[in-house]
Image: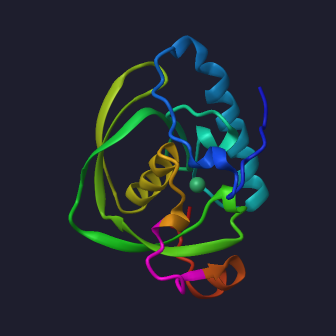
Amino acid sequence: MAVREVLLLGDPTLRMTSEEVTDFDALDEVLIDLKDTLTWAQSHYGMGRAAAAPQIGYLKRVVCVQMLERSFYLVNPRIVRRSEETFEVWDSCFSMEAKFFVKITRNRSIKVKYVDENQEFHNETFTDDMSELLQHEIDHLEGIMCSDRLTDPRNIAMRQEWEKRYRTPGLGM
Ligand SMILES: [Zn+2]
């Protein structure tokens, strides 16, 4: 369908809470636009693994993950359990145009209940890079940006410095 404009940090829509999907017949446009826009953004920014519907202006609880290993949708995802163990990650976002990175703390593993685009129910545990990725994306559905998670404002780096000093393959956004 269409590559849509990615809303940027400062846009109040990114601060709104997304609604549960109830009408799956009306979901196709969101699914396709989200995937098309993610594909464009991954190519344009040379990074990124996922996007959330509110980033393209749909206030619906939909996330699209697109990685070499695995591509899938999460509809109505909810984090139902978080590990006590945490880890630090450098995170960024298409809604920040991947121009800067923030070092924040995420739970090492999470259990997520969601349905896929065919309304199949899933109850899945994600660890490490998938865990921090989905915490980032599910935060978007609550109007939370990764920069909100900064506990020390010094833990911020422009992309060039992050690339030089901190880049960890597989992690990021
Ligand atoms: Zn994001």
Q: Quadrant of residue 173?
A: bottom right
Q: Nearer the viewer, residue 16 or 24?
A: 16
- Residue 145 coordinates in the image, percent (x, y): 54, 58
Name the residue at the top extreme: 25
Q: Nearer the viewer, residue 18 or 88?
A: 18
**Picture residue at 59% right of the left edge, 65% below the top:** 92
**Picture residue at 65% right of the left edge, 37% below the top:** 35
- Residue 111 coordinates in the image, percent (x, y): 27, 46
Is 170 displayed left or right of 129 in the figure? Answer: right
Question: Is 153 one of the magenta-colored residues?
Answer: yes
Magenta residues (range): 149-156
| Residue 170 at least partly seen | no
Is 46 displayed left or right of 63 in the figure? Answer: right
Asked if 131 appears above or below 118 in the picture, the reply is below
What quarter of the picture does the N terminus occupy?
top right
Is 4 displayed left or right of 16 in the figure? Answer: right
